[in-house]
Image: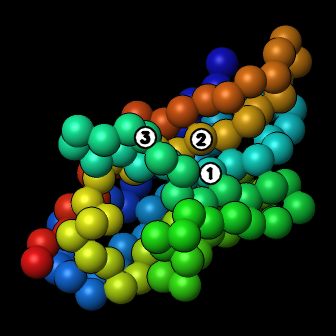
Amino acid sequence: QVQLVESGGGLVQTGGSLRLSCAASGSIFRIAAMGWYRQAPGKQREMVATITAGSSTSYADSVKGRFNISRDNYKNTVYLQMNSLTPEDTAVYYCNANVRTRERRGDYWGQGTQVTVSS
């Protein structure tokens, strides 16, 4: 079994910063891509940023230049540094990881962490 645990969400004012963390644990053989997704009220979940095992990154256009994704492969942890936050960034942020265990390979999700940006 694999668990993803997020932390770092909270309430911040417009222009502020937050850093999200997501640690994977369990019967992990290898983690391929990891990423952050978000879902605002009444909207579909959308990709925010992804990072491969080799640290190649991709970002949603709405966060380019403001957010930075990174990972620590030794700690099985992915981070999302969010700067210059706006109310449009308010959402529940979910961590995702493509994990290979001894039995299978699949996508796992964290429980989500709320990010609220006040105007």
Q: Earlier in the sequence, mark 3 or mark 1?
A: 1
Quarter holding the N terminus?
Answer: top right
Sort mark 2 into few (<14), some (14-19) or many (20+) by Cα contacts within 10 Å. Answer: many
Q: Quadrant of the C terminus?
A: bottom left
Q: Nearer the viewer, residue 35 or 79?
A: 35
- Determine the CA span between mark 1 and mark 2: 5 Å
Which residue does the numbered mark 1 point to in the structure image? 35
- Residue farthest along the left direction in this orientation: 119
Residue 116, by quadrant, is: bottom left
Q: Amino acid at mark 2?
A: Asn
Disc 1 to disc 2: CB gap under 8 Å: yes
Specify whether residue 79 is in view: no
**In the rendered image, is residue 50 in sight?**
yes
Foreground tag (3 vs 1): 3
- 70 or 39, nearer to the observer: 39
Q: Which residue in the protein does label 3 denote?
A: 45
Which residue is labeled 2 in the image? Answer: 96
Q: Classify mark 2: helix, strand or loop.
A: strand
Residue type at mark 3 is Arg
- Eye-nearest disc, 3 or 2: 3
Helix, strand or loop status at disc 3: loop
Rendering coords of residue 57 (x, y %): 74, 66
SS for tag 1? strand
Q: Quadrant of residue 73?
A: bottom right
Which residue is found at the position 52% from the left and 58% from the top?
Answer: 48
**Cα distance, mark 3 to mark 2?**
12 Å
The alpha-carbon separation of the residues under discs 3 and 1 comes to 13 Å
Left or right relative to 50: residue 55: right
* Residue 101 coordinates in the image, percent (x, y): 82, 23
Asked if 23 appears above or below 109 in the picture, the reply is below
Q: Quadrant of residue 56?
A: bottom right
